[in-house]
């Protein structure tokens, strides 16, 4: 492996959101400082350190990486730059939550090499944010966003969510309008999924059951309302100059997230930190998700060999998420058989249903196919 993207996990948050099933939890300054030291140790002692691995993108996710100080972020990035060949034009993204950044911290992040921020707004409606259990208001988001601009960040993503408790079509449209007016370079728009095991699931279990029975829920938007919000997303963002390049991601020209595109194209990546995953083409790795174990025991990631069948499935359901779809030539080159040999009947069926289309070397989802993408992508799982 000559090159790989890098993901760094920061598992801290001010307060766990009730809908969140990510690996994160509130912890104090002492625990955060100890974690950073352990993370630096892991990077330094990685089997890939000092091997001349070229790094085109870095992503610091969580959790809330912006809970770390500028000094801590600089220590992490300095370690990475010392042990890997980080590209001069490397896209280095850090997730940040509104209200967790200051003028001083943003300046320090920039000096540490961070050149792209991903800010988790979710909604511009304070009542919806409260229902989500978010710790910030829309006004606090605006303050954080403006500070980031003042400190020289010219590549900012804003995360949005639809199908929220008490959310109406009109309030979602207002969120889209307010965010687009700020002209961020990138917008990620997701529909809320109420995951089992979260406080949200217990709170809205009856609503989920009603949706599954085809009945209108009590608090969550109906299927029809959720569908209209989904349609509004693309229509509004297109009007404001955002190109939809993946099912949930929109960007201005030249600002597609290179790191995330690497995931969908199965580009190798290294994962550092608690519960972080890696992918080297034929092997998937995963660190322990146990904080005590990560901090105290030797860091030996679990390894899973990816067989050809699993690799083929990943190639299809990840690649088809992008608007450009997948390349038949790339499929043949990687798996030494044509895509028709493996998925001929499936492709014919999906074409008949106008869910995919083929143009020259590429196969991609139609607009209708994107609307029912879960169904389409499931067809390639054997």
Image (spheres, rainbow, N blue to C red):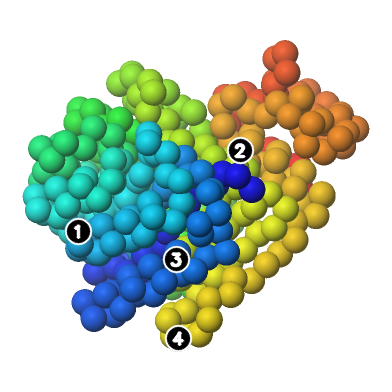
Circle 4 sits on which residue?
A: 296
Compared to residue 212, the image places residue 234 above or below, namely: above
Which structural element holds mark 2? Answer: loop
- First along the sequence among labels 3 and 1: 3
x, y percent for residue 178:
20, 33
Circle 2 sits on which residue?
A: 265
Camera sees residue 326? yes
Q: Determine which of the numbered discs, if any, sits on residue 363 in the image.
A: none
Which structural element holds mark 1? Answer: helix
Circle 3 sits on which residue?
A: 44
Compared to residue 261, the image places residue 367 above or below, namely: above
Q: Residues within 10 Å of mark 1 (few under 14, many from 20)?
A: some
20 vs 53, nearest the viewer: 53
- First along the sequence among labels 1 and 2: 1
Quarter-wise, where is residue 8 in the image? bottom left
Alpha carbon distance from label 1 to label 2:
32 Å
- First along the sequence among labels 3 and 2: 3
Which structural element holds mark 3? Answer: helix
């Amino acid at each position: 492996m000559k090159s790989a993207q890098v993901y760094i996990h920061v598992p801290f948050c001010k307060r766990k959101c009730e809908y969140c099933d990510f690996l994160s939890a509130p912890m104090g300054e002492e625990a955060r400082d100890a974690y950073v030291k352990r993370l630096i140790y892991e990077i330094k002692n990685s089997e890939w350190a000092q091997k001349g691995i070229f790094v085109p993108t870095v992503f610091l996710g969580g959790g809330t990486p912006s809970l770390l100080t500028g000094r801590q972020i600089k220590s992490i990035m300095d370690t990475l730059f010392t042990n890997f060949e980080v590209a001069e034009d490397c896209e280095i993204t850090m997730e940040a939550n509104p209200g967790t950044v200051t003028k001083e911290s943003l300046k320090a992040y920039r000096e540490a090499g961070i050149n792209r921020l991903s800010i988790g707004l979710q909604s511009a409606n304070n009542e919806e944010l409260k229902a989500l259990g978010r710790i910030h208001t829309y006004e606090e988001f605006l303050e954080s966003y403006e500070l980031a601009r003042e400190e020289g960040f010219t590549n900012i993503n804003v995360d949005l969510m639809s199908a929220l408790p008490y959310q109406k079509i009109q309030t979602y449209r207002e969120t889209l309008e307010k965010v687009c007016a700020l002209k961020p370079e990138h917008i990620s728009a997701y529909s809320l999924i109420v995951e089992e095991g979260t406080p949200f699931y217990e709170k809205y279990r009856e609503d989920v059951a009603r949706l599954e029975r085809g009945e209108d829920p009590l608090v969550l938007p109906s299927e029809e309302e959720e569908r209209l919000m989904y349609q509004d997303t693309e229509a509004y963002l297109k009007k404001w100059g955002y190109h939809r390049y993946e099912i949930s991601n929109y960007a201005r020209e030249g600002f597609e997230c290179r790191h995330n595109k690497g995931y969908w194209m199965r580009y190798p990546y290294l994962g550092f930190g608690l519960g972080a995953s890696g992918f080297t083409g034929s092997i998937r790795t995963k660190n322990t998700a146990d904080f005590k174990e990560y901090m105290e025991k030797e860091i030996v990631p679990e390894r899973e060999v990816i067989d050809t069948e699993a690799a083929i499935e990943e190639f299809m359901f990840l690649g088809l998420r992008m608007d450009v779809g997948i390349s038949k030539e790339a499929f043949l080159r990687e798996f030494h058989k044509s895509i028709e040999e493996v998925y001929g009947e499936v492709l014919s069926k999906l074409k008949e249903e106008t869910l995919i289309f083929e143009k020259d070397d590429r196969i991609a989802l139609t607009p209708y196919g994107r609307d029912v993408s879960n169904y389409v992508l499931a067809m390639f799982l054997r």
